[in-house]
């Protein structure tokens, strides 16, 4: 349980990513300085958790120096493992009576490299499109988790959804604000309603983000009636550690140059910086934003940040919500007798 009295509790999934850690930085800056705050850092590994907490502590010491008490906690959770998710639920319910902020920064991919010939063709033919909606990223098809679920479906959609489903009482107690991170690449074309677990999709990452859009549109009103405010955001295009591992020093800086060219030519979504990308998620929990639209991080050609609000094609949203709820009920039954042990120590 938090040692700080009356602290606001913020859970940030995927805190070790570029976006996740910048959400933490901006949260320190945006929550009133005198407010007591507990940040729960999540990752799949303990060394990464310790590294991230130190980085956030250093940032606070150098940039914010909050007046209120600041505490850090951590949670080891793997969203491709239902028992791990159940363990995370038990740990949070043992430690806290409420959760005020929950950021769903799930962005796992099953990338298998880059189609370099396709990349050259797209970049040469339309360089801006090539760094906005790339078609040359190779993704593995049909990957399942050990639970038998589509890996991208479970990691980026159902796993976090199931955890929130179990944490509803804590979120209600904290008048919780839930922020789901979607993408600029969540086009309806990436999702087939005959393949909701994305097992046949050649673009499972993009399909998972389309599912996030529909999940939000199908559930935010219901959550609002329970005292939980849910938002849908997109962080624009920024440097992401998960994909850039496939680039060498030359292709990395070439890609960065194209990002800046795209921004200079007027693209509002080439934020490049993880700090700018984290603008929309933080503004949703600190200011009033629309729930029936997607709130996006954007900037002008000089990097001055602002928000852009976009409509969402909600066709099929109720069907997606019903599917996820049915799956939650099935896993509630499957896990009802599951005994889990603490994963914190």
Image: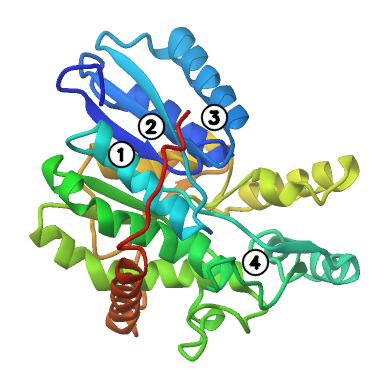
Q: Residues within 10 Å of mark 2 (few under 14, many from 20)?
A: many
- Colour setting: rainbow
**Residue tagged 4:** 133
**Residue tagged 1:** 92
Mark closest to the chain's N terminus, 4 or 3? 3
- SS label for mark 2: strand
Q: Residues within 10 Å of mark 3 (few under 14, many from 20)?
A: many
- Label 1 with label 2: CB-CB less than 8 Å: yes
Tell me how far mark 3 sits from mark 2, CA to CA: 10 Å
- In the image, residue 226 lies at what x, y percent? 10, 57
Q: Is residue 334 visible?
A: yes
Near-viewer residue (275 or 102): 102
The label on residue 256 is: none
- SS label for mark 3: helix
Q: Residues within 10 Å of mark 4 (few under 14, many from 20)?
A: few
Tell me how far mark 1 sits from mark 3, CA to CA: 16 Å
Tell me how far mark 4 sits from mark 1, CA to CA: 38 Å
Which residue corresponds to the image point at 86% horizontal and 48% vertical from the top-left?
251
**Residue tagged 2:** 40
The label on residue 49 is: 3
């Amino acid at each position: 349980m938090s040692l700080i009295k009356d602290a606001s509790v913020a859970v940030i999934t995927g805190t070790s990513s570029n976006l996740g850690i910048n959400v933490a930085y901006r949260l320190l800056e945006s929550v009133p300085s005198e407010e007591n705050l507990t940040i729960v850092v999540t990752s799949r590994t303990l060394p990464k958790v310790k590294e991230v907490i130190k980085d956030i502590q250093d940032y606070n010491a150098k940039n914010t120096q909050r007046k209120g008490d600041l505490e850090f906690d951590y949670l080891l959770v793997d969203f491709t493992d239902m028992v791990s998710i159940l363990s995370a639920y038990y740990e949070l319910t043992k430690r806290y009576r409420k959760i005020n902020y929950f950021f769903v920064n799930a962005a796992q991919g099953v990338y298998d490299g880059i189609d370099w010939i396709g990349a050259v063709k797209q970049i040469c033919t339309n360089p801006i499109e090539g760094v906005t909606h790339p078609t040359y990223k190779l993704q593995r098809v049909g990957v399942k988790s050990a639970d038998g679920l589509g890996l991208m479906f479970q990691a980026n959609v159902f796993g976090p959804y199931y955890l929130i489903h179990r944490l509803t009482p804590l979120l209600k107690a904290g008048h919780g604000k839930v922020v789901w991170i979607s993408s600029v690449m969540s086009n309806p074309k990436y999702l087939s309603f005959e393949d909701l677990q994305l097992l046949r999709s050649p673009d499972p990452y993009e399909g998972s983000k389309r599912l996030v859009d529909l999940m939000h549109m199908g559930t935010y009103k219901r959550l609002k009636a329970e005292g939980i405010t849910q938002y849908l955001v997109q962080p624009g295009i920024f440097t992401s550690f998960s994909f850039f591992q496939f680039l060498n020093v030359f292709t990395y800086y070439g890609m960065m140059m194209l990002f800046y060219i795209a921004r200079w030519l007027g693209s509002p979504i080439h934020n490049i910086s993880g700090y700018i990308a984290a603008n929309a998620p933080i503004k949703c929990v600190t200011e009033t934003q629309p729930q029936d639209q997607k709130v996006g991080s954007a900037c002008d050609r000089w990097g001055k940040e602002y928000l852009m609000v976009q409509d969402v094609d909600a066709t099929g949203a109720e069907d997606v919500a019903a599917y996820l709820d049915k799956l939650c009920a099935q896993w509630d039954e499957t896990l009802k007798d599951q005994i889990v042990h603490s994963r914190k120590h």
